[in-house]
Image (tube, rainbow, N blue to C red):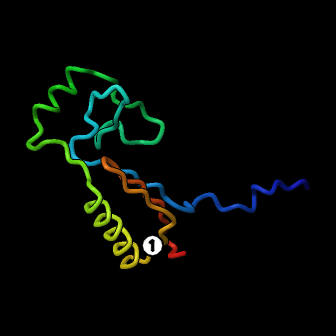
């Protein structure tokens, strides 16, 4: 019997998660870069919302505040909060990058 090494790998459990989120108002639905929503376009492999300048303008008008950008002090607060949450929930924090308009975090739930 010829065994393939893949048989011995457990691919049903994610090794980690890349979490990315944006600051309020910095990437609206209809943006030329595309976007996803919580209802219809939020599954792996599903189509993104198509660019639509009218939709983007409507979303901009509906905003209750100006787009929010993180300054140096706010970025430090976000970094510290991510570390505290990962510690409290026993998540392994492998990396984070807090930018002015978005955040990337790589975590796992094994605590390693």
Where is residue 78, by image quadrant? Answer: bottom left
For mark 1, what is the residue? Answer: 91
Q: Is residue 88 above or below residue 99?
A: below
Q: Residue at x 20, y 20 (%)?
A: 54
Q: Position of residue 23 (x, y in %)?
A: 26, 48
Residue 38 rendering spot, x and y as whole percentages: 29, 43
Quarter of the image where one finds residue 86: bottom left
- Given residues 73 and 40, the one toward you in this image is 73
**Which of the 4 image quadrants contains residue 88?**
bottom left
Instruction: Identify the residue shown where x is 26% and y is 40%.
Output: 26
Side of 31 relative to 24 (left or right): right
Where residue 15 appears, as percent x and y from the top left, is 57, 62
Horizontal arrangement in the rendering, residue 94 relative to residue 2 (left or right): left
Name the residue rendered at 34%, 37% in the picture. 36
Of all residues shown, which one is farthest toward the left?
Answer: 64
Residue 53, percent from left and from top: 24, 20
| Residue shown at the point (8%, 42%) measured from the top left | 64
Q: Nearer the viewer, residue 65 or 2?
A: 65
Pointer 1 local density, CA inside 10 Å: few below 14, some 14–19, many at least 20? some
């Amino acid at each position: 019997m010829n065994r393939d090494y893949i048989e011995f790998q457990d691919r049903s459990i994610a090794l980690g998660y890349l979490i990315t989120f944006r600051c309020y108002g910095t990437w609206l639905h209809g943006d030329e870069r595309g976007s996803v929503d919580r209802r219809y376009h939020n599954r792996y492999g599903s189509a993104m919302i198509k660019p639509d300048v009218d939709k983007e303008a409507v979303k901009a008008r509906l905003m209750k505040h100006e787009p929010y950008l993180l300054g140096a002090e706010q970025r430090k607060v976000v970094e510290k909060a991510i570390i505290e949450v990962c510690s409290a929930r026993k998540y392994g924090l492998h990396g984070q990058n807090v930018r002015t308009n978005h955040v990337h975090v790589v975590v796992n739930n094994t605590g390693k």
